[in-house]
């Protein structure tokens, strides 16, 4: 068996990125964690190393192309060729669009979309030179279906979806052994909701049902190891949202107009302006960890994801059961 190579995960100091970095390390990959917050990075690296994994953190803003290029070069010096690159870093603003500061909107786009473009370009050049590698884009059901109060985030995820499809076609045209795959996520229990910038009257929350970040991490690792699957959808709600938007987008517009404001807020009033990580990391001095504050409301398993990862076996089992049923029916008729 070939030795497992290096994996890069951006936005890895907390939440999904941190869970993914830990999951890759548990499988034996050498992991480089990129994020802006030093305390979160140091804690994530220590968590991996204490379990016997190999990891190190790089403080870097993915929207800074030169900084990200230098980080990637440094990672390959330390860990060797990058085998899998996971674009995950993100920021957001919860606000009606009409109330947003355009500078904030632009910055969300710079981090979420152009940060993915930067990471993809840097990883792609290194991988094409070796004709080997996988780029995993961490997406969302909101890459297909925009919801109120998250116009900047939804716009960036839609952009990543279109960009990735375009690049995937180009790589197929060239016959390159480099792959781009996207993992579309459901609502997740991450620290995002403790540090996101918000103009809402109540504290922000993910739209239930909520899943634990380890489910997302499992999907990301699987996608990195099975890149021929161009997209992996995680959670029944993600599948339903994407399918529903194809079939009845107008009805979803009206449904979300009615429910989308309340479902993204808790019952707790926001007493004053809370610090946020939009422009500067909050985890430079504090480790926020992998999970958010919704553990008691979050699912640790997804039957849909299990079925998606084992769909070939399921199809074979169903076909076999049908064949046996048909044959038994035929024998009963003969009798």
Image: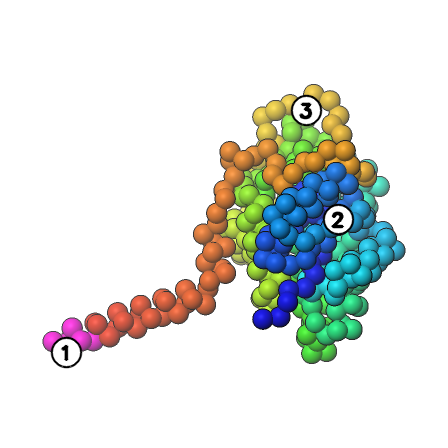
Q: Residues within 10 Å of mark 2 (few under 14, many from 20)?
A: many
Residue 112 included in the magenta stretch of the image: no
Is residue 327 visible in the rendered structure shown here? yes
Q: Helix, strand or loop at disc 1?
A: helix
Circles 3, 2 touching at the beta carbon (< 8 Å): no
Residue 334 included in the magenta stretch of the image: yes
Q: Helix, strand or loop at disc 2?
A: strand
x and y percent of residue 105 in the render?
A: 79, 43
x and y percent of residue 188 in the render?
A: 59, 43
Quote the CA–CA distance across marks 1 and 2: 70 Å
Q: Which residue is mark 3?
A: 270
Q: Residue at x 55, y 43 (%)?
A: 212
| Nearest the eye: 161 or 12 | 12
Q: Which residue is mark 1?
A: 334
Mark 3 or 2 closer to N-term? 2
Q: Which residue is mark 2?
A: 57
Q: Helix, strand or loop at disc 3?
A: loop
Circles 1, 3 touching at the beta carbon (< 8 Å): no
């Amino acid at each position: 068996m070939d030795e497992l190579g290096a994996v890069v995960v951006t936005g890895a100091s907390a939440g999904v990125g941190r869970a993914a970095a830990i999951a890759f390390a548990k499988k034996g990959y050498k992991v480089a964690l990129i994020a802006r917050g030093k305390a979160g990075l140091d804690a994530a690296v220590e968590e991996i190393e204490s379990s016997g994994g190999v990891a190190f953190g790089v403080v870097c803003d993915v929207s800074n192309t030169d900084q990200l290029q230098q980080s990637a070069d440094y990672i390959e010096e330390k860990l060797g060729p990058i085998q899998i690159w996971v674009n995950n870093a993100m920021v957001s603003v919860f606000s009606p669009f009409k109330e947003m500061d355009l500078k904030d909107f632009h910055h969300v786009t710079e981090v979420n979309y152009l940060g993915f473009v930067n990471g993809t370009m840097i990883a792609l050049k290194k991988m094409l030179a070796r004709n080997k590698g996988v780029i995993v884009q961490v997406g969302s059901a909101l890459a297909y279906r925009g919801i109120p109060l998250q116009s900047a985030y939804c716009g960036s995820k839609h952009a990543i979806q279109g960009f990735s499809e375009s690049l995937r076609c180009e790589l197929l045209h060239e016959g390159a052994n480099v792959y781009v795959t996207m993992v579309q996520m459901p609502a997740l229990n991450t620290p995002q909701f403790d540090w996101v910038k918000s103009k809402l009257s109540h504290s922000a929350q993910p739209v239930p049902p909520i899943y634990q970040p380890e489910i997302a991490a499992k999907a990301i690792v699987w996608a990195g190891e099975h890149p021929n699957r161009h997209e992996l959808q995680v959670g029944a709600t993600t599948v339903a949202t994407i399918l529903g938007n194809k079939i009845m987008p107008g009805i979803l517009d009206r449904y979300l107009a009615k429910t989308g404001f309340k479902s993204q807020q808790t019952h707790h009033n926001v007493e004053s302006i809370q610090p946020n990580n939009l422009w500067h990391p909050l985890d430079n001095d504090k480790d926020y960890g992998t999970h958010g504050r919704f553990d008691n409301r979050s699912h640790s398993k997804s039957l849909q994801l299990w079925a998606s990862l084992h769909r070939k076996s399921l199809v074979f089992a169903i076909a076999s059961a049908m064949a046996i049923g048909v044959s038994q029916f035929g024998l009963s008729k003969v009798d």
